[in-house]
Amino acid sequence: MRAIRFEAFGEPSVLEMVEAAPPAADGQTALVRVMAASINQSDVKNVAGAMKQTTLPRIPGRDFAGVVEAGPAEWIGAEVWGSGGDTGFTRDGTHAELVAVPVASLRRKPDTLSFDEAASVGVNYLAAWSGLEAAGLTAGETLLLIGAGGGVGSAAAQIARCRGARVIAADRHVPHPDAPIHAIAETLIIAARDLPAEIRAATDGKGADVVFDLVGGVMFRSAVGCLALRGRLIEIAATGQREVTFDLADFYHNESRLFGVDTLKRDLTASARVLDALTPGFIAGDYRAAPIAETCGLGEAQAAYRKVAAGMPGRVVLRPQD
């Protein structure tokens, strides 16, 4: 089979298209022909050597949609989708014509999604769902999304709307005109000089019940300052700085809570259980995949990785069968 593989960490130039032996199916493992596989920022970071758990040589790629080619009889020919924090890191990933996955992780792709769309859901929605589940966001609560214009922000806004929460969005730049956040956010704050003050003004002085900080690092202190009494802060990134400081007395007097969420801790099977929870929303049309900016074949993988690394808006999708 054709696959993208890297044998050393570095720039996308370390990626090579190779002819690799196809993985084998057995009683516990199915073989999926990959029809589409998106490229995530975490895939780019993985190739660059930022993920300490990665073993080499490795085929990268986390998200996928495809057709079951080998495995249990009842799954042969089924259109499936998936993602995993192990895929592309400690086991070969989805940027290949075929990928081996545990039978327990197989989930049927919603008919409402194309292969390209289904392959674009995984990491963004896994992070959004896991974060909001950790914080226990409920109807009537106020959610602040910091860095709302990205894929995780769009996913979190859609999930929050379905839960009956009020959404406030903040970003350095105006999100893409097609971003769902425009239709969902009650308030959209762009390039705030004093974000906590603006959040207090937008919430009658209360603050946000849940702050989902999609930037982290440089925004951490501002995020803490936006919390309502007994507010919950979700962190999934550390942009700009890994170590942060805050006023501990203020934090405990406010009875604030802090949650860290890492989708890499959820393997294919654990991630499939999140897809189970998300599937009804995609079938009903309550959720939609992020816009697809570009599709390409495996031979264009290096250029595609560079575009993702540069922050290209929308999703970049590999079609291994092209």
Image: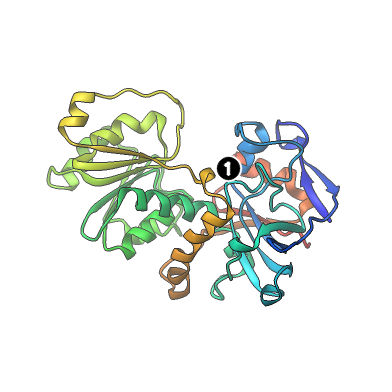
- Residue positioned 62% across, 35% down in the render: 53
Q: Position of residue 256 (x, y in %)?
A: 23, 37
Residue 322 drawn above or below residue 224: below
- Residue positioned 30% across, 63% down in the render: 163
* Residue furthest front in the image: 27
Q: Position of residue 285 (x, y in %)?
A: 44, 72
Q: How many marks?
A: 1
Q: Residues within 10 Å of mark 1 (few under 14, many from 20)?
A: few
For residue 165, side relative to residue 118 (left or right): left
Quadrant placement of the C terminus? bottom right
Q: Which quadrant would residue 243 be assigned to in this image?
A: top left
For residue 267, side relative to residue 224 (left or right): right
Q: Which quadrant would residue 12 be assigned to in this image?
A: top right
Residue behind mark 1: 41
Amino acid type at mark 1: Gln
Quadrant placement of the N terminus? bottom right
Residue 3 drawn above or below residue 13: below
- Residue positioned 67% across, 58% down in the render: 101
User: Considering depth in this image, is 203 or 122 the residue closer to the camera?
Assistant: 122
- SS under mark 1: helix
Rendered image coloring scheme:
rainbow
Q: Position of residue 59 (x, y in %)?
A: 73, 45
Residue 96 drawn above or below residue 106: above
Q: Position of residue 298 (x, y in %)?
A: 77, 52
For residue 292, side relative to residue 321 (left or right): left
Q: Which quadrant would residue 167 be assigned to in this image?
A: bottom left
- Residue positioned 43% across, 69% down in the render: 281
